[in-house]
Image (cartoon, rainbow, N blue to C red):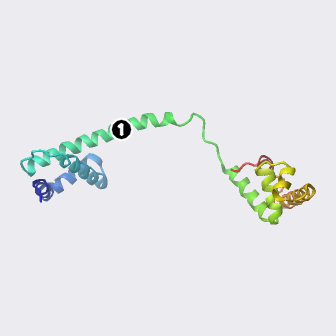
Amino acid sequence: MSADDDLMRDLLARAGGRLAAYGYLLTGSQHAGEDLVQDAIVKVFVRRRRIPNAAAAEGYVRAAMRTLHLDRLRRESRWRRVAPGLVGASELPDHAEAIAAADAVARGLEVLSPRQRTAVVLRYFDDLTVADVAHEMRLATGTVKRYLSEALERMGGVLGDDPEIADVVAKGDRR
């Protein structure tokens, strides 16, 4: 045991409650007050100091608590001033329609056979030409055209005539 350990133990035994109460008064929260006490104790005892007794240590810890708390308030105040400027001036877009459209497309893809689904994904989401899809799937171009035609017809029955969904499929958006 070092002298600092004994001093810290004595400090907490004699003034732990007072320090916690002081932290509560500064922060308005028991949890935040206790965290402040711990941060201040670490700050005071991390460096070797010649602190003669627990009463002097309490003074050091109180001063450190005050400094840490005021620094935190300044930092938060600055952040509250700066943070709104970091957000773009325009409002964030509402993604509800895009999510609904993507969900509808996923439901539409579920009704397709594995080959039809692959053809649709390669053609509309990977933006490959029909010839490239045929090459990738090792099929004839006419077969790929038939798969795409049948797939779009089957998906149309599930998706309906919603223009947003048609736009998602046409553009290949991965929203």
Image quadrant assignment for residue 91:
top right
| Nearer to the camera, 25 or 61 | 61
| Nearer to the camera, 120 or 25 | 120
| Left or right, 36 with reference to 110 | left
| Nearer to the camera, 172 or 141 | 141
Tally of marks: 1
| Left or right, 98 with reference to 75 | right
Residue drawn at the location 11% of the way across and 56% of the way down: 2
Can you give x and y, in whole percent of width and height, for residue 139 in the image? 87, 59
| Left or right, 97 with reference to 133 | left
| Left or right, 63 with reference to 143 | left
Quadrant of the image containing the N terminus: bottom left
Can you give x and y, in whole percent of width and height, for residue 152 in the image? 86, 57
Q: Is residue 175 above or below residue 138?
A: above
Q: What residue type is disc 1 on?
A: Arg
Q: Residue furthest right?
A: 142
Image quadrant assignment for residue 92:
top right
Mark 1, secondary structure of its residue: helix
Instruction: Residue under label 1, please give it.
Output: 75
Can you give x and y, in whole percent of width and height, for residue 23 in the image? 24, 50
Q: Is residue 126 above or below residue 63?
A: below
Residue drawn at the location 83% of the way across and 61% of the way down: 116
